[in-house]
Image (spheres, helix red, strand yellow):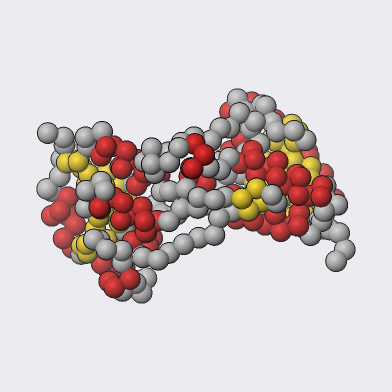
């Protein structure tokens, strides 16, 4: 299979919809196959890579921190970057700068970066295909 | 004595994977523990929460794996049995989705949409989620 380059736009904030679970399943499949992935994290999605996310215990579930093993999207982003690198693909994960500033989420996991809508334009121009997962 | 609250839950499967539960059912369970007195009516797509035996695979991204994916039917049973929160489902919404009564988790009760307004009048607070 030849290596492709995909542009992906995400909009949903962490912990607000199922869209991101679907998105990460697709991104995982892309990275498993060694494709290049350019992600534009827009609006609420600019918080996906926020480095200060923290898991928590869940007293309603009766589980402590380890037992609950609460997902954080920052860990999923980091895992995606590692998976792509392992399989020969590249991930350019761009967090919309103005969106980041609005939300105070300017500290990102390593190897993601601040950017702008111009990056998404560049991603689209360079892509074999574009996937937009908008918020509803 | 706490005010009696009828919670009509319609939003369904919204962020349940990331939260590992439904945020409203979680909230009601937590509030019940603080002394609240809740009843739940599942309507619309949320009636599917009451279907027994459902499961969803945890998310996997590379080496990262989700180990505690939600089980919504278990959460419904937990409300009924552990929290003592009555849970009803709108029977017309079940029928519209082809769900039989025998498919429901134990303890879930049926409620017709026609009887819902009368039921609402029995509560101090009605919250539609």
Q: Nearer the viewer, residue A79 or A6?
A: A79
Identify the residue at image location x=61%, y=50%.
B65
Identify the residue at image location x=61%, y=41%.
A73
Q: Nearer the viewer, residue A125 or A81?
A: A81
Q: Quadrant of the N terminus of chain A?
A: bottom right
Place of residue A134 in the rendered image (x, y in percent of width and height, measured from the top left): 60, 50
Against A87, residue A98 (above or below) is above
Identify the residue at image location x=86%, y=59%.
A3
Residue B17 visible in the displayed image: no
Q: Nearer the viewer, residue A128 or B88?
A: B88
Place of residue A72 in the rendered image (x, y in percent of width and height, measured from the top left): 58, 40
Q: Nearer the viewer, residue B123 or B16?
A: B16
Residue B51 sits in quarter: bottom left
Place of residue A122 in the rendered image (x, y in percent of width and height, measured from the top left): 82, 44
Residue A119 sits in quarter: top right
- In this rendering, position of residue B20 left or right of residue A103: left
Q: Outermost residue toward the right?
A: A2
Identify the residue at image location x=70%, y=33%.
A109
Place of residue A14 in the rendered image (x, y in percent of width and height, measured from the top left): 56, 41
Residue B68 visible in the displayed image: yes
Question: How many numbered marks have been drawn onto this rendered protein structure?
Answer: 0
């Amino acid at each position: 299979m030849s290596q492709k380059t995909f542009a992906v736009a995400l909009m949903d904030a962490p912990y607000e919809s199922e869209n991101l679970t679907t998105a990460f399943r697709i991104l995982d499949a892309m990275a498993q196959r060694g494709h290049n992935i350019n992600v534009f994290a827009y609006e609420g999605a600019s918080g996906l890579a926020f480095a200060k996310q923290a898991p928590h215990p869940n007293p309603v579930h009766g589980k402590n921190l380890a037992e609950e093993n609460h997902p954080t999207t920052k860990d999923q982003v980091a895992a995606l970057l590692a998976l792509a690198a392992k399989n020969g693909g590249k991930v350019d994960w761009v967090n919309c700068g103005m969106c980041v500033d609005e939300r105070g989420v300017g500290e990102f996991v390593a190897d993601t970066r601040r950017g702008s809508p111009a990056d998404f334009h560049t991603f689209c121009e360079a892509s074999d295909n574009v996937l937009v997962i908008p918020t509803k | 004595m706490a005010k009696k609250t009828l919670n009509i839950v319609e939003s369904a499967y919204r962020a349940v994977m990331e939260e590992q539960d439904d945020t409203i059912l979680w909230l009601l369970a937590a509030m019940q523990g603080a002394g609240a007195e809740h009843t739940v009516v599942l309507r619309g797509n949320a009636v599917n929460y009451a279907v027994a035996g459902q499961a969803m695979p945890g998310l996997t991204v590379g080496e990262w794996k989700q180990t505690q994916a939600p089980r919504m039917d278990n959460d419904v049973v937990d409300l009924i049995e552990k929290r003592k929160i009555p849970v009803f489902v709108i029977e017309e919404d079940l029928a519209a989705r082809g769900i039989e009564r025998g498919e429901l988790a134990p303890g879930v009760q049926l409620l017709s949409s026609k009887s819902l307004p009368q039921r609402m009048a029995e509560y101090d607070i009605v919250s539609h989620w």
